[in-house]
Image (spheres, rainbow, N blue to C red):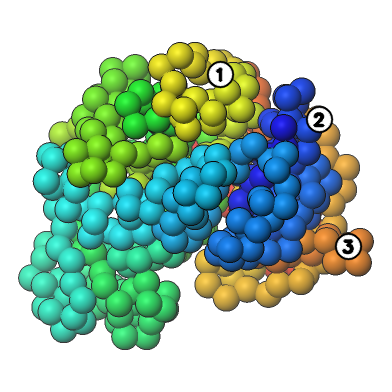
Amino acid sequence: MDVLLIGSRGREHAIALQLKKDPRVNNIFCIPGNGGLAGIATCIKMSVTEFEGIVDFLDANPNIGLTIISPDESLAGGLADILNERGHRAFGPSAEPAKLESDKSYARSLCKKYGIPSPDFKIFNDYNKAKRYASKHPMPLVVKTNGRTAGKGVFFCRNQREAENALYDVMIAELFGSAGKVVDIEEYLDGRNVVVMAITDGETVLSLPAVKVYKRVFDKDLGMSTAGMGGYVPAEGYTDEIADRVKNEIILPTVRALKEEGHPYKGVLSCSLLMTEEGPKVVDYVVRFCDVESQILIPMIETPLLDVFNAVIDGTLKDVELKLLSSSAVCVVITSGGYPLEYEKGVKINVGDTDDTVQVYHAGTRLTDGELRTSGGRVMGIVSIGETKAECADNVYKNVTKISFDGMHYRKDIARD
């Protein structure tokens, strides 16, 4: 059978490389793909929100037996619903439960209604009311855009001035456009941050190992929040006991709550968690494979991905045994200068000979007249899998220096703490 991937990130590159190992997979297509995927898949120049065009492409290629949808705008727009209605097998949640990511008020309200551990919050669509509330709220606090910003619309405010600046930038200056017309002001929680991705068919949940992710753009966790500048496994302190609590107190209750609401969840449910003194709390949901986390974990999955995806669609995940390599892994993300704000595109990328201790995953790249150039803020992820975190970090940083382009940026402290 043939497979279609919707997306252009490092996760699609990682998924494609795993699927390519499966003798049951003949051809891989990707909409729109990137410069790295172009070597292993047929990339189709089409927007991930061009839903009718995607349906037409599937109708014209009946050998495609599975479509894997990753972009949040595709899921929030209901692409999985459309494909299923048109008779095409699609991996990814439907539009209503996808609001867990695209609508903070939906996610926070669901947590409150069903007692899922999460921060206290208040939603505002009026700048002056939000400003007054923040002026009376204990500091620090967190300001988040209610809409989709690919992980960038989060501000950790240490004092009143920072809170006022964040609210002005988001609601008045429209730093993130319409995504900031409504904001979520949350209590600040202290604790270790990890991301846990779980695969579910709406009943069974298979959790993946927790990933320690570095969200801030600069070393020492300075600068703006991003979708992730790197990460590693295993996450220190994430014991089997904590993993059981996360599954039983957060992931399973979320899946059951959505079913109770009449919107069964099928796909990947990712939870950004804080390990507080009171226990784990969910601070954000992502309704797909996260990018950095996927580049780390997908190559560690030994169970054929095709079996996992089909079991989720068919509701037979209870029959799947998810096997993973017992290893450490580190990812460092290379970005364009200026990310997560404005950055230049079309910059030529020079890639030397990386060694076999790492895998280079493409994200914001494209081929132009045979040359590899930047096409986004998050350009590449460099991943190493090995015996120890230190060994993996050494391998990654040794190979990062073999890649260069004007404005190139990456953190130098990933897995070095």
Image location of residue 134, percent across then percent down:
15, 71
Of tags 2 and 3, which is closer to the observer? Answer: 3
The residue beneath circle 3 is 371
Q: Are marks 2 and 3 in contact (CB under 8 Å)?
A: no
- The local secondary structure at tag 3 comes to strand
The residue beneath circle 2 is 356
Image location of residue 88, percent across then percent down:
57, 44
Q: CA distance from mark 1 to mark 2?
A: 20 Å
Q: Residue at x 41, y 78 (%)?
A: 177
Q: Residue at x 69, y 30 (%)?
A: 18
Q: Is residue 136 above or below residue 315?
A: below
Looking at the image, is mark 2 or mark 3 earlier in the sequence? 2
Q: Is residue 281 above or below residue 179?
A: above
Q: Residues within 10 Å of mark 1 (few under 14, many from 20)?
A: some
Q: CA distance from mark 3 to mark 1?
A: 36 Å
Q: Amino acid at mark 2?
A: Asp
Q: Is residue 409 visible?
A: no
Looking at the image, is mark 1 or mark 2 earlier in the sequence? 1
The residue beneath circle 1 is 324
Q: Amino acid at mark 1?
A: Leu
Residue 356 horizontal side relative to residue 117, left or right: right
Q: Residue at x 18, y 80 (%)?
A: 126
Q: Residues within 10 Å of mark 3 (few under 14, many from 20)?
A: few
Q: Is residue 32 visible?
A: yes
> 395 or 376, which lies in front?
376
Q: Are marks 3 and 1 in contact (CB under 8 Å)?
A: no
Residue 394 horizontal side relative to residue 248, left or right: right
Q: Quadrant of residue 54?
A: bottom right
Q: CA distance from mark 2 to mark 3?
A: 23 Å
> 268 or 209, which lies in front?
268
Looking at the image, is mark 3 or mark 1 earlier in the sequence? 1
> 122 or 88, which lies in front?
88
